Image (cartoon, helix red, strand yellow):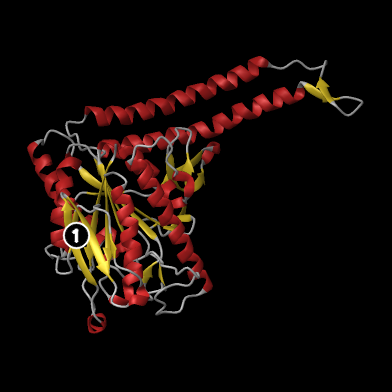
Amino acid sequence: MATINVFARWRPLSQPEAKRGELNRKTLSDRPPLLAVSMQPQAPAEGRSWTSSPAFHAVFEPEDDNHKVYNDVIAPNIPKVLRGENCSVFAYGHSGSGKTHTILGYDYDQNSQKLGLCLAAAKQLFDALYDLNEKRRGEEELGIGLSLFELRKKSAFDLLNHHNQCHIREGPDGKVHIRGETEILAGGKVRVRPIVQRLCWTFESFQQELVQALSQRTTGVSTVHDQSSRTHAVIELEVINQSLIDARQALFDRQSELVPVGKRATDIRIEEESKAYMQLADGRWGPNPDYQINQERIDMAEAEKAQYEAHVTAAEQKIEAILEASAFPCLGAKMVFVDLAGAEFYDDNGTTRPQTTRQTPQERQEGRQINTDLLALKEVMGAWSQGQKRIPFRSSTLTMALREHFMSAGKGNSTIIVTISPATDQYKATLNSLKYASLVGAARV
């Protein structure tokens, strides 16, 4: 059964919120090591008191900074990544509850206690890779490959490539690939590149690339504030070296060479088989007695196709050989951070609460799509954590884009951090977020 850890994080109250009061809440430890959260509304109109199932590994209080959260949640995973395991971290919560602050932070000083979890993880990884590179000077130097894209509605956009639109497709290998624009090259070659991956050798270069890319992220009006993240941001850190990068480039080249050859083989087969039939006097189609299929022509085209397919297979095997032969088990290991778009809370009558800002019809539609994505993610997490055979990845673009991270996490773990507000006027939104996290956490108890 896959491992998924769930944490809750209360954000501090703003000054206006503090004047209106704080929720009555407490953390329960009746079934250690897991914790439960209990809340009680101040006004009866807000509903009844509620207690979660024991689903949380830790509950962070408003005074706990990013440094505390990092040390307790992320730091224990760094040694696992260095052993070759994968790790994914999701931040879920209502708009304005502190997801982006948790994952990315707003203070980019590497010595700051407020550094977001992603940058803090990158800093510790670079420190560890530096030590590995120093100890094994005869081996190829390790670095971190950064990929970053956002999902808006049903489209993906590469934030490291001028916000170009990407396509999420399932390839012949059965895996989901996120590809950029199609390029037509000389000789009929067709190349569809993956999203851009920046190879970074230092934390400073990584930070610069990340901050610049994040400046292109889409924001908009939510039901809470007018600068809410209206997209899901997916940040991938992969331990790589130059040989792995070169081998992957060679694979893209071999795949590009195969496309026109494969198309030509298909066209020749269709042409030959179509000539073998003719339209009869009664309008039906039947064998053409005056034409014999040129099987030699078909076989030659298929042989050429098989030759180019073998080149692709050899390139794939080269990548696997590099990973297996590396003295560093961490080569190819990944950490993925997902800053989910702010969940919109709707009353039974379909209206949002609280409505403190005005949304356009398009923004309301985006809010509903975000909720659809988050519901699909919950279903996937539940099925995945219970080891079910059928996992509904196709339910949304978000879960399709993340499928390979879940499928490769058999040798790693996933973490969800639900960010919540203690403000009294956010009771129902906070309750909704806690119920979501509680269901995910309880699924694997």
Q: Nearer the viewer, residue 358 or 384?
A: 384
Q: Amino acid at mark 1?
A: Val
The number of numbered discs placed on residues in the rendered structure image is 1
Horizontal side of 280 relative to 382 (left or right) equals right
Identify the secondary structure beneath mark 1: strand
In this orientation, does residue 91 appear? yes
Which residue reaches farthest left?
Answer: 135
What residue appears at the point 39 percent right and 43 percent down from the top-left corner?
Answer: 403
In the rendered view of the protein, which quadrant contains the N terminus?
top left
Q: Nearer the viewer, residue 325 or 399?
A: 399
Q: Nearer the viewer, residue 26 or 303?
A: 26
Could you tell me residue 88's position as x and y percent? Answer: 28, 48
Which residue is labeled 1 in the image? 59
313 lies above or below 245: above
Could you tell me residue 326's position as x and y percent? Answer: 21, 31
What residue appears at the point 45 percent right and 70 percent down from the top-left corner?
Answer: 347
What residue appears at the point 42 percent right and 48 percent down from the top-left corner?
Answer: 399
In this orientation, does residue 334 appear? no
Could you tell me residue 14's position as x and y percent? Answer: 24, 78
Q: Residues within 10 Å of mark 1 (few under 14, many from 20)?
A: many
Horizontal side of 58 relative to 305 (left or right) equals left
Give the quarter of the image for residue 299. top right
Q: Nearer the viewer, residue 329 or 244?
A: 329
43 lies above or below 109: below
Horizontal side of 429 relative to 35 (left or right) equals right
Could you tell me residue 329's position as x and y percent? Answer: 19, 34
Give the quarter of the image for residue 284. top right
In the rendered view of the protein, which quadrant contains the C terminus?
top left
What residue appears at the point 71 percent right and 23 percent down from the top-left corner?
Answer: 273
